[in-house]
Image (cartoon, rainbow, N blue to C red):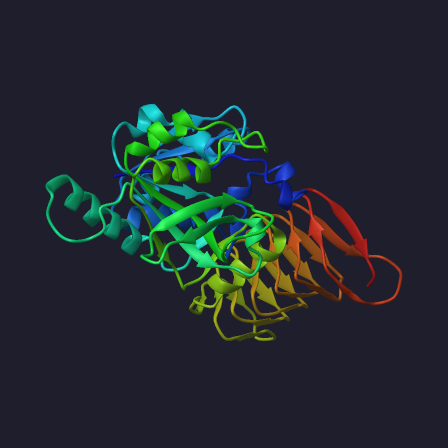
């Protein structure tokens, strides 16, 4: 089995951060969200992965390399424009061959990984090839979860037997609240499907249309509903929520310098080379290498990347990217601060601030 990871796209919902960075490389708990997906793929026993890349291809290549750090062999497949998930399958045809494969959206996060999902598909495909067993003999398998706003997702309608009956992409009137999670498993029959469908009203080759083609042509498409945590990190709110979820499992590890005038409370991970002076850090939180926290408060569910400065400030429930400086501000919370951004005081009335800052930006706030 192989893996196809979608690492292109414009990341429009995370602008201005993604004007200068690939959305899949925005870190949560100080690690790019793409890396969690690659680790999940390797954990499931898959060794060969192709990353479909677009304009941010050089950045993705530099971060992932040959894949060996994840236990993978990485190949890169260029996609000139993001023309849909099914189009990604189309352009990766030579890499995929006739092998089964998992397709994983690079900005998605699934708690618990995909081991069980991949194992169930392998078992089903083995039974189909050998004619043994009584399990589901499927050519495609999708992962579903219940959501409050199904119109924002691809939506599945299941029959009484649990088989997938119909799929709709971002329907105005959803037939269910079961949304497609960004992980799919396919056999080689999907190639005939993606070659047969036509672009949707959005001008894209929709993977939901390809799966519907499989259903309409007699292929057995199965689903697995997950009850665990899943998020598409394509917007700021969801990215902060994923950061919170990951930090809940952090264990305390203070490897940097903490002076006697500081207090570190709870699950706080401080990387080597980081310095905490005259400050209070309350976990769960992570502080990156080379970062300095001085005369400040860093509260729960906060990730501060490497080489940052937090000085005479208060910071909570936020993600701060590498090289950012937060100086002389009262309370910054629920914020995403870009690389090398600077937050500094300005005259005015003290208040809580909520920020989404692009890389290298400068914002003046009330002291």
Nearest to the observer: residue 210 or residue 18: 210
Tell me where residue 338 appears, x and y as whole percent: 64, 47
Q: How many marks?
A: 0
Residue 47 horizontal side relative to residue 154, left or right: left
Q: Is residue 113 left or right of residue 59?
A: left
Rendering coords of residue 342 (x, y %): 72, 50
Residue for point 52% across, 23% down: 80
Question: Viewer-proximal residue, 125 or 296?
Answer: 125
Q: Position of residue 198 (x, y in %)?
A: 48, 27
Residue 185 percent location from the top left of the image? 33, 43
Q: Within the image, what quadrant is residue 237 found in?
A: bottom right
Which one is in front, 233 or 228?
A: 228
Quarter of the figure that contains the C terminus: bottom right
**Quadrant position of the N terminus in the picture:** top left
Q: Residue at x 28, y 32 (%)?
A: 188
Does the image show residue 327?
A: yes
- In terms of image quadrants, where is residue 93? top left
* Picture residue at 29% right of the left edge, 44% below the top: 220
Can residue 291 be seen here? The reply is no
The picture quadrant where one finds residue 349 is: bottom right
């Amino acid at each position: 089995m192989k893996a196809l990871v979608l690492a292109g796209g414009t990341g429009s919902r995370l602008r201005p951060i993604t004007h200068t960075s690939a959305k899949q490389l925005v870190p949560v708990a100080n690690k790019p969200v793409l890396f969690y997906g690659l680790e999940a793929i390797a954990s499931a026993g898959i060794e060969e992965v192709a990353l479909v890349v677009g304009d941010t291809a050089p950045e993705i290549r530099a971060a992932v390399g040959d894949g060996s750090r994840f236990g993978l062999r990485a190949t890169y497949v260029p996609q000139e424009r993001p023309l849909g998930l099914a189009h990604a399958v189309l352009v990766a045809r030579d890499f995929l061959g006739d092998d089964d494969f998992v397709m994983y959206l690079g900005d998605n996060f699934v708690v618990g990984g995909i081991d069980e999902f991949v194992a169930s598909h392998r078992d089903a495909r083995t039974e189909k090839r050998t004619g043994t067993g009584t399990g589901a003999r499927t050519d495609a398998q999708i992962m579903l979860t219940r959501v409050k706003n199904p119109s924002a997702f691809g939506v599945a309608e299941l029959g009484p037997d649990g088989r997938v009956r119909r799929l709709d992409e971002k329907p105005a009137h959803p037939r269910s609240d079961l949304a497609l999670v960004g992980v799919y498993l396919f056999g080689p029959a999907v190639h005939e499907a993606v070659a047969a469908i036509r672009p949707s009203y959005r001008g894209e080759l929709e993977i939901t249309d390809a799966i519907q083609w499989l259903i309409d042509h007699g292929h057995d498409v199965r689903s697995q509903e997950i009850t665990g945590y899943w998020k598409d990190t394509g917007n700021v709110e969801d990215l902060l929520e994923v950061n919170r979820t990951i930090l809940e499992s952090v264990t305390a590890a203070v490897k940097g310098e903490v002076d006697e005038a500081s207090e570190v409370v709870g699950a706080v991970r401080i990387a080597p080379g980081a310095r905490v002076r005259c400050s209070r850090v309350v976990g769960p939180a992570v502080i990156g290498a080379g970062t300095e926290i001085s005369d400040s408060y860093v509260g729960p569910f906060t990730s501060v990347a490497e080489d940052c400065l937090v000085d005479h400030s208060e910071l909570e429930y936020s993600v701060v990217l590498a090289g950012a400086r937060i100086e002389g501000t009262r309370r910054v919370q629920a914020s995403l601060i870009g690389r090398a951004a600077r937050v500094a005081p300005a005259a005015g009335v003290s208040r809580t601030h909520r920020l989404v800052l692009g890389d290298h930006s400068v914002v003046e706030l009330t002291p």
